[in-house]
Structures are given as structure tokens and as C-alpha cells.
Amino acid sequence: MKKLVVLGAGESGTGAALLAQAKGYQVFVSDKNIIANSYKQQLLDYKIEFEEGKHTWDKIKITDEVIKSPGIPNHTSIIQALQEISIPILDEIEFASRYTNALFIGITGSNGKSTTTHLAYHLLKTGGLNVGIAGNVGTSFARKVWSDNHEYYVLELSSFQLEHIHNFKAHIACILNITPDHLDRYNNHLDSYIATKFNILRNMNKEGHFIFNQDDTNIREYLVKQTTNLPQLYPISLTQSTHQGAYVENNHLYFVGDNYNFQLPTQTLPLLGKHNIYNTMAAISIASLLGLSSASILDGLRTFKGLPHRMEWIANIKEVNFYNDSKATNVESAAVALESFTNPIIWIAGGYDKGNDYNLLKPIVKNSVKALICLGKDNTSIYKAFKGFNIPIYETQVMQEAVSLAYTLAKPQDIVLLSPACASFDLFKNFEDRGHQFRLAVQQLLTQ
């Protein structure tokens, strides 16, 4: 019986362990941290051997293969030791792809992955395809393959999940954008991060399809260097037309391919913001390449509600609109959120600052923001960045205070926007908790 070690017992690792056991492997799960009770119970229920709080090298070194959970960096001692004795290391995505004949739609990018993945899935599902959704969106791909049998899978893929891709082959791949992120994982080398994102093209050939953001400099420049085994290219752009792909012109989106040619007015799009035009173009391109009609796609767009914490409209209170964009944990995400509105904005921002450079936001704040409310334990960096602007700046560590203050400052037609540009874990459990507290605070205003 072939032996398999799974490092890490989160969603990815537990899903991989369940699938591996079902496929006849002798499985051992090792997690240096304490395993969450829900995952521990699953391992117990299926009688999968595991350990927590340590890695026992004598049990690990005798395996045939190792599945590494995405959160484990390659420079950790256990990974280095495995590489020294040449034990194959693969990702859960790679492992799961062995056990399904489905077509894979892989979506990556620094921002917008989740929205695009969910929208593409929604369009395909409402269009009648037998499709599943997995990856970096909550349910691991391995768990989906273990429990379901779909003809298509839409997979959100992080750079971490793409590091150990060997034979995985996407039918359609998409890179939405590339901005500096997770550089501590890649020795502060942007080129290494970009190369990892482009690993999504590995094993693809001219029969495959690659959707990419033509307006993104990092993508465009890296793609120029790739000259062999490229799939068919489908650029998406807000600034230039193309004979194959998608573009915007005269307030219409145009989609052009070998088997489709249609247009949609921009007002039919379900999501706010320039960034969401790219996301929607990518999702519609995926649906078009899989044979869905423009009528079916339009029907799907009408019923898509968007995702929580991503430019999520919460309420209109006396003509003041409240939006929850708690998922905006970096400067680039906050920039596209702020640019989505033409009305004055009371901006709630701040949190754990990961060394942000706020220069990108300065011209946007100057033009659009009427007040800044800093919500964090240490607001020094964001306060310094905007203290010279002719806007009032406030500080608080309580979400309810931030929302109440924003409402007090707002006038009819103003926007109250939570788009932090920072991580959440100084005051909150995660970005979901931060967004949930924002929603509750707004709902309390409704009862006053």
C-alpha cells in the first residue's frame, strides 16, 4: 500500500487525507499546531492516523509522497528536510486532479479571485452545466472530488496553491491582476511571485485558453517572455480593443471569440467598480468559451448577488449608503473601492498595517474622501499619510463608534465605506468578523 503524509490539517489537508484514504493510500496527517476540533473529528471518524503539535520525522521520512498544505512555506525545516531526501512534495490541488476527468477552470490574481470564481461558477451553474466550485474559496478541491462528481470545476487558486503544481492542467486559466503581495514568502522578489502565478499555465497547450488582464503591466511584461506552449490568448481590457477576448467601448462590453461575438451594456453588470468590470469580463469569457449563449449569461448576471465583505451594500439610511468592503486588506483593493463612487465618501480604514505605501491612495482620497475614520490599534502610518489633506481625521478602536461617527458626518447622498487597506487581526478575528461587526453596527442605526 502506497504511503502518503499530509502536512497540515486544515481544510486543504483534511480534504486531501479523506480523498487519499478513499483511493487506497496509507495516510498519516501531521500538524505542528493544534488541529481544529471539526477537522480532528473528521480524521477520527474515518480512522485516519494523525498527530498534532509536532512533526515526527521518523514517521514522515518513510512516506512515498507528501501533500503540503498551502500555508506552509517552502523554507520551513520540515520541507527542506524532505527535499534533501528527494521525497516528492505536491499540492492538494495537484493530488485531487489525479482522480477526476473533469475540465478545470483555474482563476488566480492578487485581487478579485473570489468574486470572479463565484461569478463564473454562478454563470455556468445557471447555464445548466454540471459544475463544482473549490480551491481557495472555502471547500478544498480534494474534498469536492472525494464527495462529488462534476464535469467542470471552477477553482480559485492562490499563489501558495500553485507552488507545487506538476501535472495539473487547466482547460481555461485566468490571471486577473498581479500586484505585490505575500513577498515575504518569495524573498521579497516580485518576479518570483509573478512566476508562481504563471505556474497556472503549466502543462497547457494550444488547445487551452488563457484569459488575462492586458492592462496589467506585470502580466503583460511577463507574458512577452513566454514563447513556447502558450494556450490561446484572450486578453481583457478597459483601454483597447482586441480581435479575441473582451474589451470596453462606448459603455458596452464586447466579447469576441471563434464561436461567439456579442456585447452587453455596462449597466447590466451586477457589481460596482472598475475592478469588477475586469472580474465580470473574465467570468463571462469563461462562460462563453464553454459554449453558453449570451442570453443565458445575461440571465445569470441578473441573479448574481455578489459576495459578503466585497463592496457589499448594507443599507440606505436617510439617503446615506453604507458599503462593507472589509475584504480590502491591501492598498490596491481599497483604491478600486474608493474609485467606485462619484459621491463624497466617509472612509473607515486602518487595522494591522503590513508596511503599506499609501501613495496610490493619495490622489483618490484628495478627490473623493470628505472624512477619514481610522479604525485600528495603531493608526500612525495611515494618519501620517493623510494628515496634510484638508479632511478631518478621527481615530477609534470600536466599530460601533466608527459607524456612528460616520453617520453623524454624512449628508444625504454621501457614501460610508469600510475599505480598510489593512489586515484585520489587530482588533478582529478576521476580515469576516470585521465586516460582520460593521453590518451589525449599521443595522443598529436602522433601529434608532
Image: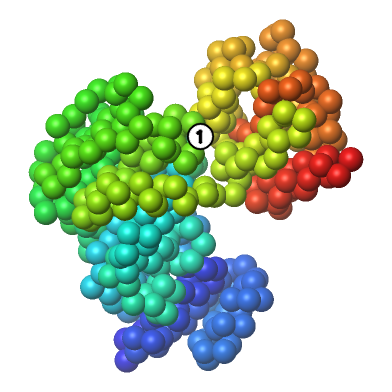
Question: Quick one: SS at disc 1?
Answer: loop
Residue 83 visible somewhere in the drawing: no
Q: Is residue 372 left or right of residue 10?
A: right
Query: What residue sits 11% from the left and 38% below the top?
Result: 227
Q: Can you give x and y, in whole percent of width and height, for residue 116 in the image?
A: 41, 47
Residue 151 visible somewhere in the drawing: yes
Q: Is residue 52 left or right of residue 215?
A: right
Q: Quadrant of residue 18?
A: bottom left
Query: What residue sits 81% from the left and 42% below the top?
Result: 446
Identify which residue, 211 or 384, lies in the foreground. Answer: 211
Query: What residue sits 69% from the left and 9% below the top?
Result: 389
Q: Can you give x and y, in whole percent of width and height, for residue 29 in the image?
A: 50, 78
Q: Can you give x and y, in whole percent of width and height, for residue 387 in the image?
A: 72, 13
Q: Can you give x and y, in whole percent of width and height, for residue 136 in the image?
A: 46, 57
Asked if 8 appears above or below 443 in the picture, the reply is below
Q: Quadrant of residue 311?
A: top right
Asked if 100 appears above or below 440 in the picture, the reply is below
Query: What residue sits 56% from the left and 35% below the top?
Result: 330
| Residue at the spot of label 1 | 272
The kind of residue on which mark 1 rests is: Leu
Identify which residue, 210 or 412, lies in the foreground. Answer: 412
